[in-house]
Image (cartoon, helix red, strand yellow):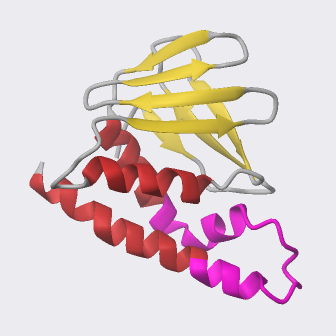
Amino acid sequence: MSERINLSVPARGKAHLTFDVGTEKPLDITLIYTQDITGTFLPQFRAFTEIENPAWTIVLPIISEDRNYLIVSKKELTYIIDETTKELYVCEDGAADLILTCIDDFETNDQDWANFDIVDDASSIGYARDVANRIALIHSSVTDIRPYFLRI
């Protein structure tokens, strides 16, 4: 788990991805329920940890409440671009730290993350199925990703 990257448990339609970027205050990116966070993050994490054909960079577009961010994480560093203000931030933790922080939280709080970005009302017919499918996606992805960290 990273000391410079933190992911909060989703609550009331929001979660926070926070990076220590060497400034007085950490960079706090608000994740909102209308963006498919686990569905966006997990394929990038899988590609990075692929043994035979690894991706060398993780690219995560984030649509926040009032800004858009682009997170570009490489082996050694993570770059966060605030596309609204055109500012660049650098976190001294790399892709492995970002991946472990996120998958640990996704797995530990699978019910919260499964519910986070499903827009349907809990009373709708497909809601329970969608939550179950999202939980299965989280766990199957973590099962695929975690062995990579046993090798490094």
**Residue at the spot x=70%, y=62% of the render?**
116
Quadrant of res 78: top left
Label the magenta part by its dominant secondary structure: helix
In depth, the one of 63 and 112 nearer the eye is 63
Q: Is residue 37 above or below residue 124?
A: above
Magenta span of residues: 106-133
Left or right, 149 with respect to 71, comes to left
Residue 117 image offset from top left, x and y in percent: 71, 61
Q: Can residue 136 be seen? A: yes
Q: Is residue 63 above or below residue 7?
A: above
Q: Can residue 100 be seen? A: no
Residue 106 image offset from top left, x and y in percent: 50, 62
Q: Is residue 39 above or below residue 60?
A: below
Q: Is residue 16 above or below residue 83?
A: below
Q: Residue furthest left?
A: 151
In depth, the one of 140 and 52 nearer the eye is 52
User: Is residue 74 within the magenta segment?
Assistant: no
Quadrant of res 63: top right
User: Is residue 107 within the magenta segment?
Assistant: yes
Q: Residue furthest front?
A: 53
Quadrant of res 129: bottom right
**Residue at the spot x=66%, y=19% of the render?**
83
**Residue at the spot x=52%, y=11% of the render?**
23
